[in-house]
Image: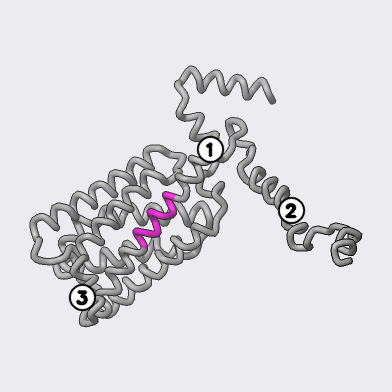
Amino acid sequence: MAAATLRALPLRAAPGWSSAARQRPQVAARAAQDRGPFAGKFGEWRIEPEDELEVFSYRSALSLVAACFGAGTATALAPEAGWAEALAAHGTALAALGGLSMGAATLLIHVYLDPLKKALQALAAAGLAGGVYLAATHPELPLPAYVAQHAEAVWLVGPSFAALTGIAVKEGFCFGQRESYLLTFLIPALLLGHLSGLLPGDAERVLAVAVALLLAVCAARKFTQPVRDDIGDKSVFDFFKLSDQEQQARLEQLRGEQ
């Protein structure tokens, strides 16, 4: 009787399953639409998997920079705490990770002007080299502690922070992020204030905390942006990869299509 009753009942999919089944094609269509094609200055372009990986790597590099700076700031605020002492003991390793991440970010960032991108890379490399020199010649102290106690050391590690300021300028100019605008002024103020000795100790710590918090916000917000934002107009980058003859042919092709 039960079996006969079941056979007589109309078959219906569970509401949740039916809804999910209807949504899957919509989600796939939206995902495909998010990847393009997009109209660029030099033709249509699409977001490829390698583009997504590059953007994720750039954002991850910025997150590591923010995390390393935040960890160093935290140890300065609580020097007598057990966890702070343990973290401070690895300050040189944290500084190295932050410097390498800064370099990676300058390699992965999308900037239309290639000389500007190369300048950011040179600054990051110079700051990393300066940090390596200080760590090698003054192994008695973790690198952040040495820089904190010897203001003149800013001349050697400062270029990395100059590169970070450049990235903040780019993020603020392109996306209007308020935290990036603030970092554009606060990072140089922190470094120059420490170098000149004009900032009292408490003011310097407050400024360092502000920079650490803003860096964390900036890095976190990057993951909420569409991938397309960090890529920019990919057709511009593809165009400049072409030879002079190929660029001329591409321009003539675009004129013919107008």
Residues in magenta?
Answer: 57-66
Q: Amino acid at mark 3?
A: Glu
Looking at the image, residue 211 lies above or below residue 29? below
- Mark 3 lies on a secondary structure that is helix
Looking at the image, residue 96 lies above or below residue 83? above
Does residue 49 appear left or right of residue 35 in this picture? left
Comparing labels 1 and 3, the label whose residue is closer to the camera: 3
Does residue 110 appear left or right of residue 250 in this picture? left
Q: Amino acid at mark 1?
A: Lys
Q: Quick one: quadrant of the C terminus?
A: top right
The dominant secondary structure in magenta is helix
Contact between marks 2 and 1 (CB within 8 A): the answer is no
Question: Residue 220, can we see it?
Answer: yes
Is 61 magenta? The answer is yes
Q: Residue at x 72, y 50 (%)?
A: 26
- 63 or 156, nearer to the observer: 63
Task: Where is residue 206? Give x, y as percent.
Answer: 33, 76
Which residue carries the number 3 mark? 85
Going from N to C along the chain, the mark reached first, 1 or 3, is 3
Task: Where is residue 150? Give x, y as percent.
Answer: 14, 66
Looking at the image, residue 168 lies above or below residue 186? above
Q: Residue at x 47, y 48 (%)?
A: 55
Task: Where is residue 70? Give x, y as percent.
Answer: 33, 68
Give residue 21's mark: 2
Does residue 192 appear left or right of residue 35 in this picture? left
Instruction: Assess disc 3: are there few (<14), some (14-19) or many (≥20) residues with their C-alpha within 10 Å of its C-alpha.
Output: some
Give residue 234's mark: 1
